[in-house]
Each structure stands twice: as structure tokens, then as C-alpha cells.
Image: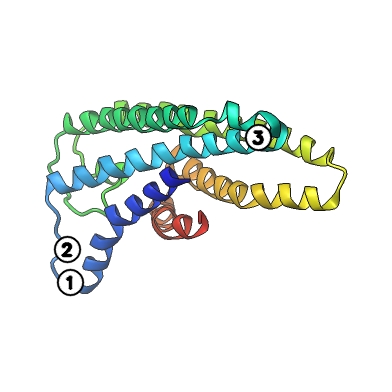
Amino acid sequence: LSNLAIIDMSYASNNVPKMLANLVSQNKTMSFVNCLTQTYLYLTFAHTECLILVVMSYDRYVAICHPLHYSVIMSWRVCMVLAVRSWVFNSLLALVHLVLILRLPFCGPREVNHFCEILSVLKLACADTGLNQLVIFAACVFILVGPLCLVLVSYTRILFAILRIQSGEGRKKAFSTCSSHLCVVRLFFGFAMVVYMVPDSNQREEKEKILALFYNLFNPMLNP
């Protein structure tokens, strides 16, 4: 939960101040270095949240399906290892995207549609971005589809465990524990898969704006 809170605060701190500044200022410029930094941090936080949500679904699975073994299976050391590995792996994955962006020439146009997010930055390149798109798709399969399948497996087993609970109060408590997390997971993965895995369309830019708004504002409000 603390990792999720850090990610949510980082999302907002990375993007929202510049968005607000653009609304009230005539000077809406951003340096190339700052734009790439914003892109890198956005990717790191987005990727890390995917894996943190998977870890949380496993935590709920252990808590509901194996309550007597919870303190042993989800010990402080296990939680730390899972969290650290999530941050390190996704920081490196975001760095791969950044290196692939740096190899591209940028000769115009120099206007980003909303904020410095990887798809928006790639539109500014005046060279073939096929390799970048391929890596993005492969990362989506690994970061979105794979984790989503693990989450669904966890919650399927949780559902069967809840249905076996005899008392109505016990079922209510179990459902309340998982419903909010499942809601965030559904919205988070759903929006991301629509934007990054659906073929390009005329509405892509509008979808990206909705995704940015969701990640920067709605998701941090839902998670608590």
C-alpha cells in the first residue's frame, strides 16, 4: 500500500504541475531533456504500478484463501523483495524505451498534444519508429496482459473461496476487501490496453488524453 501511495503521488508530481502551468501561462515550452525525463518517470511509475497491483492481488488471495499462513507467506521480507524487484525491473524497462527514443532524430513538428508520454514523443520523430512500436507492444504483453491474467487467476480463486464462506458477514467482509482493488485494476489495465495495444486510429490522441487524466487524477483518488 505504501508503494502504491508513492506511485500515485509521483504520478501527480511528474505531470500535473506542468499541466496546471500550461493552463495559466502563455509560455508552454519544455526542454527536450525535461520532456524525456517526464517520459521516463511516467513509464517507470506506470510499469511499476502494474506489478504492484499484481502483488496486491496475490496478497488478497493469501489473506482470504490461506489466512492462517498469511503472516508466514507474506512476511515483511517477502513484501520488500517483491516491491524492490518491481521498482528495479520497471526502471530498467523504462530505460530501454528511453534509449530507443534517443536514437531517433527529431526535426519537427515540435508540439506535444498533451504531455510528454512515449506515444506523443514518438510522433515528433522524423524516422521510422517501427522498432520502438515493437518494443512497446512486447512490453505491453509482458506488463499488461501477463499481470492481468495473474490478477484474474487470483480473483477467480478468491471468488470460489468466498462462495464457500458460510456466514453472510464473512462474505461481505471479503467482498469489501477486494471490490475496490478490483475496480482500480479493471480501469487501470483496461485504459492502458486500449491505448497501447489497439491499432492506431483517429481517436488515439483523445484516448491518450483520457488515459493521462485517469492516471494522474482519478486513479490516485480511487486507490485510497
Disc 2 element = loop
Dot in front, 3 or 2: 3
Mark 1 crowdedness (10 Å alpha carbons): few <14, some 14-19, many ≥20: few
User: Which colour scheme appears in the figure?
Assistant: rainbow
Numbered circle sitting on residue 61? 3
Q: Are marks 3 and 2 in contact (CB under 8 Å)?
A: no
Which of marks 2 and 3 precedes in the sequence? 2
Mark 2 → mark 1, Cα distance in angstroms: 7 Å
> Can you give x and y, in whole percent of width and height, for residue 155 in the image?
68, 37
Mark 3 → mark 2, Cα distance in angstroms: 46 Å
> Can you give x and y, in whole percent of width and height, for residue 205 in the image?
38, 53
Q: Nearer the viewer, residue 201 or 137?
A: 137
Q: Residue at x 32, y 45 (%)?
A: 42
Which amino acid is tagged 2? Lys
> Can you give x and y, in whole percent of width and height, for residue 174 in the image?
72, 47
Left or right: 106 with respect to 218? left
Q: Residue at x 32, y 50 (%)?
A: 10
Mark 2 crowdedness (10 Å alpha carbons): few <14, some 14-19, many ≥20: few
Q: Which residue is mark 1?
A: 25
Q: Nearer the viewer, residue 36 or 63?
A: 63
Q: Is residue 129 visible?
A: no
Mark 1 → mark 3, Cα distance in angstroms: 48 Å
Q: Residue at x 38, y 47 (%)?
A: 7
Left or right: 155 with respect to 164? left
Which amino acid is tagged 1? Ser
Left or right: 179 with respect to 87? right
Q: Which residue is mark 2?
A: 28
Q: Is residue 85 visible?
A: yes
Dot in front, 1 or 3: 3
Residue at the far right in the pictured view = 166
Q: Quadrant of residue 209?
A: bottom left
Disc 1 element = loop
